[in-house]
Amino acid sequence: MPTLYYEKDADRSLINDRKVAIIGYGSQGHAHALNLRDSGIDVRVGLRAGSSSRSKAEAAGLRVLDIADAAKEADAIMLLLPDTDQADVYERDIAPNLKDGDALLFAHGFNIRYKSIVPPTTVDVAMIAPKGPGHLVRRTYVEGGGVPALIAVENDATGGAKGLALAYADAIGATRAGVLETTFTEETETDLFGEQVVLCGGLTALITAGFETLVAAGYQPESAYFECLHETKLIVDLMYEQGIAGMRFSISSTAEYGDLTRGPRIINDAVRAEMRKVLDEIQDGRFATEWINENKTGLKNYRELQEKGREHPIEKIGAQLRSMMPFISRGRERLEDISGGLES
Ligand code: NAD
Ligand code: MG
């Protein structure tokens, strides 16, 4: 059994005497900064000059410095900028201010795994990655709970990197929920695979292809939308609560027989072989290189694909049908309220 760490396992004294800098004040940044501060940790926020977050952080009672000054003053630096912006900021403002024995901390492994950031071997490199959106990291902490987190150590220069990561996880409330140890490689590769193959890419492509097949066969787009998109949530909720077997217990035996006999024909050997290719591209760095280049060249392809998705007939019919279900948009407002946007 993998080890899970809880409050009793963390030694808070390992972070109590540290000067922590939170770089960025977005979804994760505000939650880490405020939770650490409320846990009695010495925290400052590093923001670029002219950042619109500066007044928000100051209004919350936090000390705000320029990124380079925050990095210079601190001995534990948590990078909470968008992953594609971290390398430039690191080179310019952080690297020149790292001292031997400092800790460089991340909430996702991308830049370390793909070496767009290569820290000196004289600093600790560790991850504390909450498994939930930043606004829940803050809200559950205030309510006395916490969001589970992964911790990992990439470089242990001082011998204390893991203890510090666990103490940090404790101070943001994660040990109240459970902290699991992983590696930068496992966290990065499984996160990318999950979002590409199952959660985002696989699911949206499956729904869209099902919708297109029904509409092309002459069925009403309204029926196709309800069947292929709307009901997805109802089925997923059952799986979330009771697993796949529990979901199958709740559906009709006709639905279950169709599931058992037809599902494997859809996700067939060719699809599994493609999944393995997508994983290969993650493991050998081709996906990371492609995405980093896309960012460097102005995101043209990305924007075109986004636009094509927005113009798909499933969006038009969906907007109409959802406007007749106002209870759904109330759910959406609640979500925006708590998460300030969706998963990164
Ligand atoms: P975000 O987009 O919400 O916030 C980024 C912050 O950085 C903002 O304050 C923004 O103003 C600032 N910023 C943006 N570009 C900048 C630049 N070029 N220079 C300086 N500042 C800049 O980011 P986030 O979603 O909180 O993600 C931060 C890290 O946390 C990432 O590594 C991400 O993978 C990880 N993470 C996020 C979530 C989540 O729920 N959003 C969950 C787990 C891990
Ligand atoms: Mg993810």
Image (spheres, helix red, strand yellow):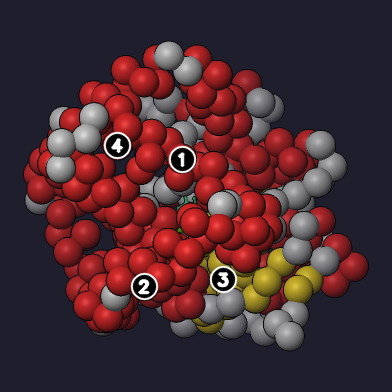
Circle nearer the N terminus (1, 2): 1
Residue that badge 4 annotates: 224
Q: CA distance from mark 4 to mark 1?
A: 10 Å
Mark 1 is surrounded, within 10 Å at the Cα level, by few (under 14), some (14 to 19) or many (20 or more) other residues, namely few
> What x and y, as percent, mark residue 200?
36, 53
Circle nearer the N terminus (2, 3): 3
Q: Residue at x 76, y 42 (%)?
A: 141
Residue 161's image quarter? bottom right
Could you tell me if residue 55 is visible in this image?
Answer: no
Circle nearer the N terminus (2, 4): 4
For label 4, the SS is: helix
Q: Quadrant of the N terminus?
A: bottom right
Ligand 2 within 8 angstroms of badge 4 C-beta: no
For label 2, the SS is: helix
Q: In the drawing, what numbered circle is on residue 264?
A: 2
Q: CA distance from mark 2 to mark 3?
A: 40 Å
Circle nearer the N terminus (3, 1): 3
